[in-house]
Amino acid sequence: MNMIDATRVRDREPCLLPAEALASPLFEYKGALYPDYIRCGNACRFIQRAALAFCRGHGVDVGAGDWPLPGAIPVDLKSGGEAMALPAGAFDYVFSSHCLEHLADPVGALLHWKSRLRPGGCLFLYLPHPDMVYWRPQHNRKHLHSWRPKQLRRLLADLGFVDVIGSGRDLAWSFATVGFNPGG
């Protein structure tokens, strides 16, 4: 397979795509078509503008990887960071993009993140939507969990978050859910 050097959005880092990807903006997986751009990672770029409207002040990006949310303290799980051990202090926001589905104990992580939010602090989650077959746990073994938007909104409300809102599936085959720590 020929590989072509494409460009990632942030810092112009190389992202290798199959040469045939340039022939079409789509790729096929198990009979369904998806946009080619989602194969390079950096899902945060698709939600960043909306996230920055909510994520203001002092906060963290859990699972930041190579592309942390601007202004956030990155907690990079690939480099030994731990979703259950955030940096010291209380936060105005916790942002996490395409991370929660990888955690063995997502409910425990959400409760930990909530305990680290100041009253009125924002939890902003961006997750893969199960409409994309590849992101379902039975096809992508790195994904331990999968939620639909309504399920995640209900989960956050059950865990005590208030004013929980969310989106439907976007063209990055992902969705956002936002909740607030009560008392703000």
Image (cartoon, rainbow, N blue to C red):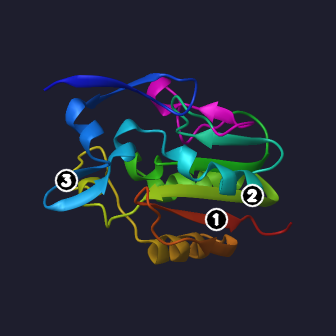
Q: What element carries label 3?
A: strand
Dot 3: within a 10 Å radius of its alpha carbon, few (fewer than 14), some, or many (20 or more) residues?
A: few
Q: Nearer the viewer, residue 100 or 23?
A: 23
Chain-order first, disc 2 or disc 3: 3
Q: In this view, does 3 lie above or below 60?
A: above
Q: Is residue 83 above or below residue 80?
A: below
Spatial CA distance of label 2 from label 1 is: 8 Å
Label 1 amino acid? Val
Q: In this view, does 15 lie above or below 83?
A: above
Residue at 25%, 41% (x, y): give it.
Answer: 23
Q: Nearer the viewer, residue 61 or 162?
A: 61
Dot 1: within a 10 Å radius of its alpha carbon, few (fewer than 14), some, or many (20 or more) residues?
A: many
Q: Name the residue under label 2.
A: 54
Q: Name the residue under label 1.
A: 178
For the N terminus, the quadrant is: top left
Spatial CA distance of label 1 from label 3 is: 31 Å
Label 3 amino acid? Glu
Residue at 39%, 44% (x, y): give it.
Answer: 37
Dot 2: within a 10 Å radius of its alpha carbon, few (fewer than 14), some, or many (20 or more) residues?
A: some
Mark 2 vs 1: CB contact within 8 A? yes
